[in-house]
Image (spheres, rainbow, N blue to C red):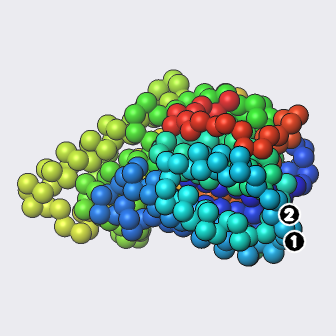
Amino acid sequence: MIILAIETSCDDTGISLVKATGGFKRPQFKVLSHNLSSQTQVHEKWCGVVPALAKREHGRNLVPLLTKTLKEGGLRQVAPPQNSPADTKKIRKILEREPELLELFNKIIPTLKTPRIDAIAVTKGPGLEPALWVGINFARALSLVWRKPLIPVNHLEGHLCAGLVKEKGKDKKTNPKNPPLNFPALALIVSGGHTELVLAHDWLKYKQIGGTRDDAVGEAFDKVARILGLPYPGGPQISKLAKETKNRKENPISLPRPMINSSDFDFSFSGLKTAVLYLVQKLKAENKLDKETKSFVAADFQQACLDVLLAKTQKALIKFKPRTVIVGGGVIANRELRQQLTRMITRNFPTVSLVIPELGYTTDNATMIAAAGYLQSLSKKKLRVAPKLRAQGQMPLK
């Protein structure tokens, strides 16, 4: 099955072509083309994602990214079907709230031949609703023009599937070649918008057992980076600054580890962020916030987050005894988290497999949406062309 996937849940526009095989038992994915357009420079001066700007940029990026993806994918193409006046009217109606995208669509799409794909997958939620709507409407219009069925996908399930996508020779240290994925599985999702522990009894059968009560861990990284005067996005900047403390004296900074000893599987990072704020204000008042001290603050903040994530994951491993741990989300690009999580599971749970996405698939991307779309397609008796969909800013994984 060949799937064209579209991802616009936040500030990255993603389109991918993926060949999927193997069914539920052994799903395998061959990436034919994988493209991502980042909006970091657009949002950098705001120190965070502005939904209206994200929506605008998606509208500008989708058509050029589609043409690039199709060209790189190398698929056989056929002449496009002739659209009736009724179809043309429907497309105009679908894209009426995206005038810039509608103009590009009408200019470029009729000149393209229809790719030999079996379905289109698109992120339905969760995410920023203005951004989600652009991707959904674009996918619906393509589905109608090309007469291809459309598969709505939960963005969080996409992160769970990201670890199934393998490329030879990459990330050998923290991602062994094709580790077995056996159920039940424990999933840790860590990103700018989510921090969740999920128990998966099988694909498409999920139960959330823990989540953040306030800030997501990735959000906390961005906010602490701003407190320390670091550029956006904050995660990589915190990690880079923390790395400077390696091989130095013992860290004099000691921040709290919120909820690390609580009996549940929930998280809280807002208090940790506030502790950093008060500490930085105090150090500034005492004229002690030099570069070295900043690096120590960054290092202990990062380790505090990791300590809590690892402690809760270990507690869930002990209680639920899963056969596999799956991790996903942008924060898993953090090298320290990858290494410490791998070390913890290897030492303490040697019979448990660990599935970590390769670095290129940790952030929001369309390849993971294609993988999740394939699994969704296996569970549906009939897929429809251009079904009515609604963007869901909040969408639980179940």
Q: Amino acid at mark 2?
A: Arg
Left/right of residue 268 with respect to residue 102 in the rendered view: left
Who is closer to the viewer here, 373 or 231? 373
Identify which residue is drawn at 59% across, 50% down.
92
Helix, strand or loop at label 2? It is loop
Is residue 333 visible in this depiction of the protein?
Answer: no
- In this picture, residue 386 sits left or right of residue 217: right
Vertical relation: 42 (above or below) 129: below
Pinpoint residue 94: horizontal percent, then vertical percent.
60, 46
Tell me which residue sits at (82%, 59%) in the image.
81
Estimate the x, y position of residue 121 in percent, counting from the top left.
72, 50
Q: Quadrant of residue 396?
A: top right
| Residue drawn at x 85%, y 51% as measured from the top left | 27
Along the polypeptide, which appears first: circle 2 or circle 1? 1
Tag 1: amino acid: Arg
Residue closest to the far top: 263
Please tell me the numbered disc located at residue 76.
Answer: 1
The residue carrying pointer 2 sits among few (fewer than 14), some (14 to 19) or many (20 or more) residues within 10 Å by Cα, namely: some
Q: What's the mark number on residue 116?
A: 2
Q: Is residue 218 above or below residue 76?
A: above
The image quarter containing residue 348 is top right
Front-lying residue, 10 or 185: 10
Which is nearer the eye, 5 or 355? 5
Q: Residues within 10 Å of mark 1 (few under 14, many from 20)?
A: few
- Are discs 2 and 1 less than 8 Å apart at CB? yes
Q: Quadrant of the C terminus?
A: top right
Provide residue 248's location: percent of width, then percent of height. Answer: 35, 69
258, above or below 220, in the image: above
Q: Along the line of sight, which residue is nearer the eye, 191 or 308?
A: 191
Judge from the rendering whether residue 24 lies leftward or rightward of residue 387; answer left or right: right
